[in-house]
Image (tube, rainbow, N blue to C red):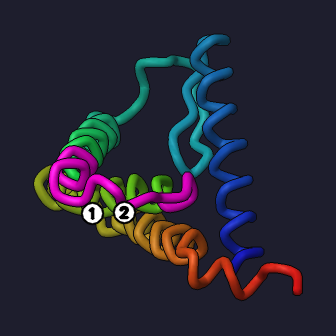
Amino acid sequence: MRFLSKIIVILLSIFSLIIIFGFIFNFSVVFPFTITNDIHDVPESRLQAVRLATAATFAYFGLRYIFFQTTKLYPIQFMGIFLFFLGSMGGIVIYKFQLSLSEYFVSIFFLVASIVLYQAGKPEFRSYFKKK
């Protein structure tokens, strides 16, 4: 599980850097690796999914802060939480926009990745991998 979580983090980090450099150099990259020569070619549904996932993550952490101030999270758990909201909000957007069934695979990928990353960050799971 730890190896899988590291692979997911590495791949998503590289993809994120490619997106940033693409914007700087006037090309667009959309998950999973669709490259266009125009930075305005990101589908509206993907933009809405990211917007809603960001808002949901902010709301989640706001409520978490209000009710559970002392609970600590690892960064990998934050990534898992954001990917969970990206997958779930993406599914809602896909349904609302009535997109093709293949678009659901992207949301499913993010949901599975969120579970792996969140579980890998739990203290009781992390203790299995500590050197004795």
Q: Residue at x 23, y 55 (%)?
A: 64
Q: Quadrant of the N terminus?
A: bottom right
Q: Could you tell me how many numbered marks the image carries? A: 2
Q: Are marks 1 and 2 in contact (CB under 8 Å)?
A: yes
Q: Residue at x 51, y 17 (%)?
A: 38
Give the alpha-carbon distance from disc 1 to disc 2, as whole Å: 6 Å
Is residue 48 visible to the viewer in this orientation of the structure?
Answer: no
Q: Is residue 12 left or right of residue 63?
A: right
Q: Which residue is mark 2?
A: 84
Residue 109 position (above or below residue 74): below
Is residue 70 visible to the viewer in this orientation of the structure?
Answer: yes
Question: Residue 101's spot in the image, x, y percent?
Answer: 31, 69
Q: 10 Å neighbourhood of mark 1: few (<14), some, or many (≥20)?
A: many
Q: Which residue is mark 1?
A: 88
Question: Residue 46's spot in the image, x, y percent?
Answer: 34, 42
Q: Quadrant of residue 104?
A: bottom left
Q: Quadrant of residue 55?
A: top left
Say if the magenta span includes residue 1. no
Label 2 amino acid?
A: Phe
> In the displayed image of the protein, which residue is found farthest to the left?
96
> In the displayed image of the protein, which residue is found farthest to the front?
70
Nearer to me, 112 or 81? 81
Label 1 amino acid?
A: Ser
Q: Which residues are magenta?
A: 61-77
Residue 92 position (above or below residue 121): above
Q: Quadrant of residue 6?
A: bottom right
Q: State the SS at label 2.
A: helix
